[in-house]
Amino acid sequence: MKHICESRERVKVNRMLELEKRIYENGIDYVLVGDYYIPDLRLPEERRPIGKWGRMHREYLKEYRPAVYSDLVISGKLWTYLADLNEQAQARLDLIIEQMKAAEGVTEDVKRRDWCSWVQHMGNIQNRAEEIIRAEMIYI
């Protein structure tokens, strides 16, 4: 019985030695792990931060659009998508704030004369602009 077990082990070891450590099949790289080939999947390298807007949109996708979220995760495009969205939302926010400041006459002169009023106006403008971004870009 001992002889049979040893011979099975030798056959198993010889078979593993015959298998290639890495193979490429159907457009996917595979790595040998034990007796099985596992897909060698890697996410693309993305260094940009997803920021406030990207995090908010990611949570929205997880909660209300799970199919879209899963598709982006599986394709490896989620981080790039969220980083792009964050940059676009921030640029749009800055533009909206500048337009609102100009339309409402909130200038540096107002800041010098009555800084408390200027802070109130700017806080109001910031909140309204962020609400526009959430409605137009984040929760869609």
Image: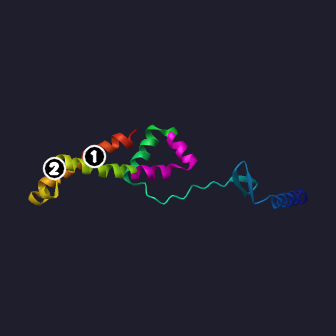
Q: Write down the residue under mark 1.
A: 129
**Total count of labels:** 2
Determine which quarter of the picture holds residue 133. Answer: top left
Q: Main secondary structure of the magenta part?
A: helix
Q: What residue type is labelled 2?
A: Gly
Quadrant in the picture for residue 132 = top left
Q: Quadrant of the N terminus?
A: bottom right
- The residue sitting at 45% across, 58% down in the picture is 48
Give the Cα separation between the discs numbered 1 and 2.
16 Å
Residue interval drawn in magenta:
68-87
Quadrant location, the C terminus? top left
Q: Answer with left or right where residue 35 lies relative to residue 64.
A: right
Between 81 and 14, which is closer to the camera in this rendering?
Answer: 81
Report the mark closest to the observer, 1 or 2.
2
Label 1 secondary element: helix
Which residue is depicted at the point 72% across and 48% down? 26
97 lies left or right of 88: left
Q: Name the residue under label 2.
A: 105
Residue 102, position in %: x, y? 20, 49
Q: How crowded is mark 2: few (under 14 residues within 10 Å), some or many (20 or more)?
A: few
Residue at image location 29% in from the left, 43% down from the top: 131
Q: Position of residue 139 (x, y in %)?
A: 38, 40
